[in-house]
Image (cartoon, helix red, strand yellow):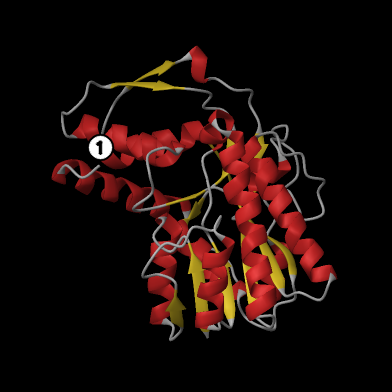
Amino acid sequence: MRVYLTGARGFVGRRLVTHLVAHGHTVLGAERETDVCDGLALDGDISDSSPDAVVHLAAQSSVAASFEDPDACFRVNFHGSQNLLESVERFAPNARVLLVGSADQYGGQPPGSPPLREDTPLAPNSPYARSKTSAEALGIHWNQRGGNVVMARSFNHTGPGQSDRFVAPSFARQVAEIAAGQRDSSLHVGNLESIRDFLHVDDVIEAYSSLLEPAVPPGVYNVASGEPHTIRQLLDALLEHAGVQASIEVDAARVRPTDQLLGDATRLRGTTGWRPRRDFNRMIADLSGDWRSRVADGVP
């Protein structure tokens, strides 16, 4: 297929480009970053490239940043999605479109709750989650008008190359710095008891690729492992893998209520055959190894 990507230079985008090319697809849009807030620029890209499929990864992806500037978050995540869908409708109306959303759209659940299904009512509680929910609503509306949009609600995923703005790479970087003697052995943390559904980024990429297949019906799909891990288990695994001992100090300013985000990907598995191929330990090993190398090489 000819696949047009937004956000091709981001954490997921770079790895997805490699995956798609390795599987014989032609990737379009990777040579430059088009501002998705610029509808005319997107019109030009889509009309010039005539894609068979479009993957929309460009986003403001930080929950914390969304509270700092909600307008900017909504402009990129909602209006950017709107601009892209309108360009596709005008210049590539038969293209499959993948809109990437987030498990944050569900809102935190009480620990012990059943895994979240696509029909679970949404309760977005941040500007980021609300912007993603609004963008998904556009996709649903497009499908009602005869569009061809699949929407992924992706649960926590990490791996080599992710920014340390997120919890797993933030821990991995600090642990690597302790191991390298570049910082003292104390870690300041928030609530370690919240439960998350962690995935290796390469499994998420394979899920996205599977959703581009024309036989997959339009609609919403969870991308999740279905396996619960507390944030404490994540940190302990990183410390154990690095052979590091650290003192854990809870910072009251970072503490949030204990909650759970655990997904049910039965629909995705049943439709595409996808399932995670890399377990939690593999994710930890790859993330830890990446940050050891980056810290040793002085790479931010």
Residue 298 in the image: x percent, y percent?
16, 42
**Left or right: where does residue 236 sit relative to residue 36?**
left
Is residue 10 among the parts visible in the rendering? yes
Give the camera-side residue of 106 and 236: 106
- Percent across and percent down for residue 275 are 58, 67
Give the residue at mark 1: 176
Q: Is residue 234 above or below residue 197?
A: above
Q: Which picture quadrant has residue 19? A: bottom left
Residue at the spot 63% in from the left edge and 79% down from the top edge: 91
Give the image quarter of residue 66: top right
Residue in the picture at 20% in, 33% down: 179
Q: Position of residue 132 (x, y in %)?
A: 66, 49
Question: Does residue 226 appear in the picture of this structure?
Answer: no
Q: Is residue 235 above or below residue 251?
A: below
Residue type highlighted by circle 1: Ala
View extreme (top): residue: 252
Nearest the viewer among 262 and 102 is 102
| Quarter of the image where one finds residue 104 | top right
User: Label 1 crowding class (10 Å Cα cut-off): few <14, some 14-19, many 20+?
Assistant: many
